[in-house]
Image (cartoon, rainbow, N blue to C red):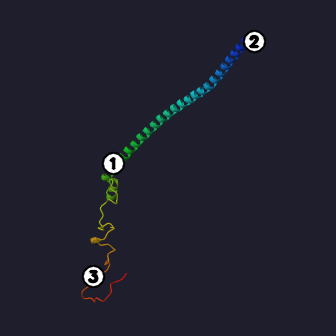
């Protein structure tokens, strides 16, 4: 009889140990699930906040673009009004040019000086052997040495 009782006691002890191990495993695995669920919830909240910030930022840039367009339009209207007033009332030619968009550099000048160049005339530059030397006259003595610099 002791032999039959030992089998039952061993079976009950194994059953209780299995239940204990199962409860412990479920608790450990369920903790990770809860942690993951909290992380997903925080991620969803962050994405919602990001989308709201993007909406606010888009509204801000749209308003800024409208204001810049308005400023440009008003500036253009002011320039036109000043130009019309200058044409009607002003006698100074330089003021009229500046208001009509011509700068003083664009105004025609009386000086005929050419712009500086980085090359010499006739394809001969400063490295030519006879640069700066005068042509000898046939009447001068050929024994005079050329001018040295």
Q: Is residue 62 left or right of residue 23?
A: left
Dot 3: within a 10 Å radius of its alpha carbon, few (fewer than 14), some, or many (20 or more) residues?
A: few
Residue 25 drawn above or below residue 1 = below
Secondary structure beneath label 2: helix
Secondary structure beneath label 1: helix
Residue at the disc numbered 3: 135
Quadrant in the picture for residue 40: top right
For the residues bearing labels 1 and 2, Cβ distance under 8 angstroms: no
Where's residue 50, x and y in %? 50, 34
Please identify, in this view, whether the residue under mark 1 or under mark 2 is nearer the observer: 2
Residue 113 drawn above or below residue 99 = below
Please identify, in this view, whether the residue under mark 1 or under mark 3 is nearer the observer: 3
User: How many marks on residues?
Assistant: 3
Q: Residue furthest right?
A: 2
- Marks 1 and 3, how far apart at CA: 62 Å
Q: Residue furthest left?
A: 138
- Marks 2 and 3, how far apart at CA: 143 Å
Where's residue 1, x and y in %? 74, 10
Which badge, 2 or 3, comes first in the chain's sequence? 2
Which badge, 1 or 2, comes first in the chain's sequence? 2
Residue at the disc numbered 2: 2
Dot 2: within a 10 Å radius of its alpha carbon, few (fewer than 14), some, or many (20 or more) residues?
A: few
Dot 1: within a 10 Å radius of its alpha carbon, few (fewer than 14), some, or many (20 or more) residues?
A: some
Secondary structure beneath label 3: loop
Where's residue 147, x and y in %? 34, 83
Q: Residue furthest top?
A: 1
* Numbered badge on residue 80: 1
Q: Is residue 140 left or right of residue 57?
A: left
* Numbered badge on residue 68: none
Quadrant in the picture for residue 13: top right
Which residue corresponds to the image point at 31% horizontal and 71% vertical from the top-left?
A: 120
């Amino acid at each position: 009889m002791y032999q039959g009782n030992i089998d039952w006691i061993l079976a009950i002890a194994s059953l209780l140990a299995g239940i204990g191990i199962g409860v412990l495993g479920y608790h450990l695995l369920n903790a990770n699930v809860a942690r993951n669920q909290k992380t997903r919830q925080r991620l969803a909240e962050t994405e919602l906040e990001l989308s709201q910030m993007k909406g606010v930022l888009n509204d801000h840039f749209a308003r800024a673009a409208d204001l810049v367009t308005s400023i440009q339009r008003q500036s253009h209207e002011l320039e036109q009004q000043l130009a019309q007033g200058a044409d009607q009332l002003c006698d100074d030619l330089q003021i009229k040019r500046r208001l009509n968009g011509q700068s003083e550099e664009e105004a025609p000048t009386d000086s005929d000086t050419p712009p500086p160049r980085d090359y010499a005339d006739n394809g001969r530059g400063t490295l030519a052997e006879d640069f700066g030397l005068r042509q000898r006259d046939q009447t001068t003595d050929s024994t005079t040495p050329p001018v040295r610099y």
